[in-house]
Image: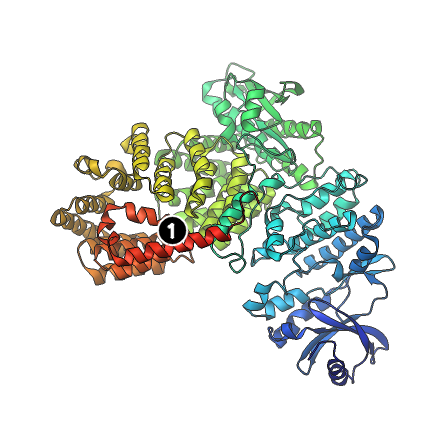
Amino acid sequence: MNETSPELLDRLASSLSDRYRIIRLVGEGGMATVYSADDLRHNRVVAVKVLRPELTEGVGSERFLREINTSARLNHPHILPLLDSGRAGDMLYYVMPFVEGESLRDRLKRDGRLPLDDATRVIAEIADGLGYAHRAGIVHRDIKPENVLLSSGHAVITDFGIARALDQAGDSQLTRTGTATGTPYYMSPEQWDSAPDIDGRSDQYALGCMAHEMLIGQRPFAAPTNMALMLQHLTAPIPGLRDARPDVPEHVEAAIKRAMAKLPEERFATSDDFASALRSATAHLPLPAAPPAVRRVPKIPANALKGVAVAVLLAVAAYAGFSMQNRGPSGPTRLAVLPFQNQGPSSEAYFADGVSEEITNRLASVASLTVIDRRSTAQYRGSPKTSRQIGDELDVEYLIEGTVRWTGPSSTQNSVRVTAQLIRASDGGVLLPYDTTAKVDDVFAIQAGIAEQVTEKLSVALLQPERQRLAIQHTENIEAYRNYLQGNSAYDRSWARADVASALAFYKKAVELDPNFALAWARLSRTHSWMNQLRYDLSAERLVEAKSAADRAIALDPNLSDAHLALGLYWYWGFNDYDRALPELLKAKQLQASNAQAALQIGNVRRRQGRFTDAIASYRQSADLNPRSHNAWFNLGETLLYIRDYDQAAPFLRRATELAPDFLEAWIQHARLAINGRGDVATAGQIIRTAEERIPPTAWRPAMVEFVRITRPQNLQEYLDRLRPGTYGLDSTNYHSVKGRYLAQLGRQAEAAVEFDSARMVLEKMRDNQPAEAWIHASLGTAYAGLNRPADAVAALQQAIRLLPVTRDALDGPELLAILASAYVTLGNADSAAVYFDRVLSIPSWLSINLVKADPLNASFIGTPQFQALATKVSARESARARAAPPSGQ
């Protein structure tokens, strides 16, 4: 039966005859058929909307009605209220006032684009209505011109809560179609991403797309298919307005671009802020925090694109044209604070570092500035390079440099002179000289003064929260501050236990001297969690201390970025609780737009959640903010390698080794890349040899010893002779395991069994003491396999997989599947080995079919029919992915 058939109209009229008299069909939309009707109880004309039959079949009617009624409490002049809802036979309906006028879509069809004043007023009115609803906890999810009515020229949002009601009441198939969760031309990246935590910023993005259409007369993104349209929303630069329509004010274009940022945290915090920005003719509003061409690439929904390889190509496409030394012309003003020169006693060098760090942190909270992380600027201490050279290397427009000089013969006089200059990097021109002498107790006022004068000189319009962050005084106790700075110095010095413990002691002293020192509490929390992450102290008491300190910091200053970063790291490092960690890390990034560490850790968490394209975007942000640090570049390359985009991974891994030639992990991944991408074991061996020449064995890790085994088998006996507990980073457990594998590869099975049995004895005790540690069970399973104990080996490894499944940790989980596959090879079970290798090779992981072939311990498996079938299957899968990938350059 057709929806518009007379039979349907008759059935509806009959079912509702006691309350409504159906007059006529008004129109049909994507979710409902609309009729005008007389409300018999209240003597008024209403619109009765009947849910389309295909949607009715996919939802639970009781839950739909319950969900939709949550929007009935909305009462705002720019929101059309919900009057009634219910079931009429097999039909679900809801009732709203009948509005005389036209929809915004009708107006756009007729006029093409709106006059400037009309457009900005309508956009602001919609933003007002959305802001009100969002404060009530209700998100529209389907903002589009069809859902905005124009009554006497003013905007009224209709169908509020319908999309959420369908989403909450519907089955997974319904939500996967996109029917109930948005309209493709206006859907936010996170809606395409099927993110579970959609909030009001998604509506803001849709409104930004509508605003573009109202002002230009065409949608910002258009494509012949939903697939192509999705790619534009996920990866394409945000289009400008003023090129097409020069009369659009700069502040209006800036506000709309910010509303359309790919990352929710880079949009306005609320739709009310968006409305205010549109109405402010003088505000110079910040654009999103990264150039549009290198934006976040959200995770591609699995049903939309088959295979992670395609998602990887999309991520790479988003970064097309990116150069490590050349950014696009748009974006926030970029500057760097160079290390201030200490012109006092050498023992006070930490104080000068603290001044420059604090100025960096204050300016980093301004959204319209991109401030380079101090870890990238540290290398320019006393550098002979010109301002232009430094500006080019950091890709910044401005530099801040300065000095700290104690005015007396010693620091005990508690008086300090601070000078600072804002320099134009291109020509070294001094734009702002600053020179003051004050008591050391006034150091925060000095730092705030420099930061405020810089923003004024650069004509940066500050929001009120940003002004507050610039002027904040963290403590009035100068001794507490000194201890805090010394804690920072120790924390940054190295990962050595002595330095971490020293940092902890300084931070503890700082909060003892000033219990209200929120920043010191935050750093104390982070250091407690770091002790756990480095496995220096795995006690529950250590994590209790970390949580207590983070909670204290947030209670003292809820808007302190460091406090939310600390709490996020507590959940991440302490418990691998990614769902709790991520919101705190995102909050830290929101509060401090140029927080490179927050961006890095967001990438780390997203990667473990399996959100690899999101992780790439976060690492790119971190690298942009911290370009002279190897960490983000390495993680970019490592993640691309993990999702088997080997060509794209290579330059990032090279960059990491250029910046940190002694960073072992980058060399290991370079060797893996040579094997995984090209099956080039010889080149991998040369890379390992280069790493060996540059990095002393005392800094090695077990992974390095394993790659020696695979890439340099001719030297196996030489390395075996050198193996000792404590050498090459081997503790007593992995020493016996590694030695067992070396001996097995040399064919000395009896000697190998002795080593595996030694490993077994140690590991069984560890398992009994730490039964929840997946890696212990995995190592024990490998030892059992080496001892030819199949049942014990499989049981131990399956327990490891249960403790750390891929669904819980997408980074380390696949490794356990690979270990089980290798154990089956050792046990001579080619069928099971092929099954588990195939499982690992079908998902993102370190493994490739080339690496399976390259490992000498797999020699007995390589010649089997099972391996040949596996290799054929993998080859077919890779060919299918290559065919599904978009052409180069798209």
Decide: few, some or many residues near mark 1? Use Cα within 10 Å; few <14, some 14-19, many ≥20: some
- The amino acid type of the residue labelled 1 equals Asp
Is residue 871 among the parts visible in the rendering?
Answer: yes
Disc 1 is placed on an element classified as loop
Can residue 567 be seen from the camera position used here? no
Image vertical order of residue 252 relative to residue 3, above or below: above
For image coordinates 48% across by 44% down, the residue present is 601
Q: Nearer the viewer, residue 83 or 393?
A: 393
| 646 left or right of 81 in image | left
Which residue lies at the image location 65% right of the left edge and 19% below the top edge? 430
Where does residue 465 sit, x and y in percent of width and height? 67, 41
Q: Is residue 481 above or below residue 69?
A: above
Q: Residue at x 21, y 52 (%)?
A: 860
Closer to the camera in the image, 837 or 154? 837
Could you say which quadrant of the image residue 476 lies in?
Answer: top right
Residue 499: percent from the left, percent from the top?
A: 38, 33
Decide: is 456 above or below 227: above
Residue 754, given in percent of the width and then of the height, sits at: 14, 49
Quarter of the picture containing the C terminus is: top right
Residue highlighted by disc 1: 812
102 or 766: nearer the viewer = 102
Furthest toward the right, the residue is 152
Q: Quadrant of the N terminus?
A: bottom right
Asked if 569 appears above or below 39 in the picture, the reply is above
**Foreground residue, 60 or 522?**
60
Indicate the colouring scheme. Answer: rainbow
**734 sits left or right of 559 in the view:** left
Q: Give left or right: position of 182 versus 530.
A: right
Q: Outermost residue toward the left?
A: 750
* Residue at the spot 50% in from the left edge and 51% down from the top edge: 310
Say how many tags the image has. 1
